[in-house]
Amino acid sequence: MLTSDILDTFRGLLDEAKASGDREPTAMNLATSDASGRVHSRIVLLKGIDEHGLRFHTNRESAKGREIAEHPQVALCFHWKQIREGVQVRFEGCVQRLDDAESDAYFASRPRGSQIGAWASKQSQTLPDRQTFEERVAHFEQEFAGRDVPRPPHWGGYLMKPDRVEFWYGATFRLHERIVHDQDDSRWSTRMLYP
């Protein structure tokens, strides 16, 4: 479980990033690895954080979904260049699926176009041409016309439970400040790192 100190620090920085005019302050880099050990990264959006961890949602049949199923140890990184002298927050830990009720609730809150897109996209699979995708979008728009769009069975949320958190504060001459929190069993320790 994340400590109140970690949560308060992160939430304060996120509020600063939102106030800075950053177009996507909840954007975070998600790094996963496949069965061969090859590392892959991409941007996903934070959809919640509390003492249990960080939440995000995606197509579970995508490359990242398959990689998480094979190797649930992941890393997340926020980078906010617009605040202070630049700030990064890094989280490392294990991911688990959110339950269907939480995934359903979030999916229901998404714009309808995003809901249709979740059905239409065979995320990470080869797409022969854009027209094929547009035809799939049209198909699902017709299928769900006049009614709510249900959550696809292959789409859902994840909870990343960190056991390591680093706050990185940029400084001139690259004399950055780095504060790391590590969890060992249920206890957290804090230390500084050289930049």
Image (cartoon, grey):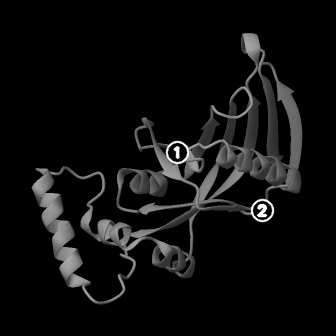
- Between 32 and 42, the one nearer to me in the picture: 42
Locate residue 19 relative to residue 103 in the image: left or right.
right
Residue position marked by numbered label 1 in the rendering: 30
Q: Say what amino acid the circle numbered 2 marks.
A: Glu
In this rendering, position of residue 50 left or right of residue 179:
left
**Mark number, residue 3:** none
Residues marked 1 and 2 touching at CB (< 8 Å):
no
Residue 18 on image: x %, y %: 65, 49
**Taking 91 as reference, is 32 left or right?**
left
Inter-mark Cα distance, 1 to 2: 19 Å
- Number of numbered markers: 2
Residue under the image location 23 percent in, 76 percent down: 141
Q: Residues within 10 Å of mark 1 (few under 14, many from 20)?
A: many
The x, y position of residue 50, in whole percent, is 74, 63
- Residue highlighted by disc 2: 51
Quadrant location, the N terminus:
bottom right
Mark 2, secondary structure of its residue: loop
Query: Which one is earlier in the sequence, the residue at label 1 or at label 2?
Result: 1
| Residue 180 falls in image quadrant | top right
Q: Is residue 61 visible?
A: yes
Element type where label 1 sits in the image? strand
- Image-based side of 55 in relation to 139, left or right: right
Q: Quadrant of the C terminus?
A: top right
Picture quarter containing residue 167? top right
Within 10 Å of disc 2 (Cα), the crowding (few <14, some 14-19, many 20+) is few
- With respect to residue 193, does 189 lie above or below? below
Q: Amino acid at mark 1?
A: Leu
Q: Residue at x 49, y 50 (%)?
A: 44
Residue 92 seen by the camera: no
What residue is at 72 percent from the left and 14 percent from the top? 174
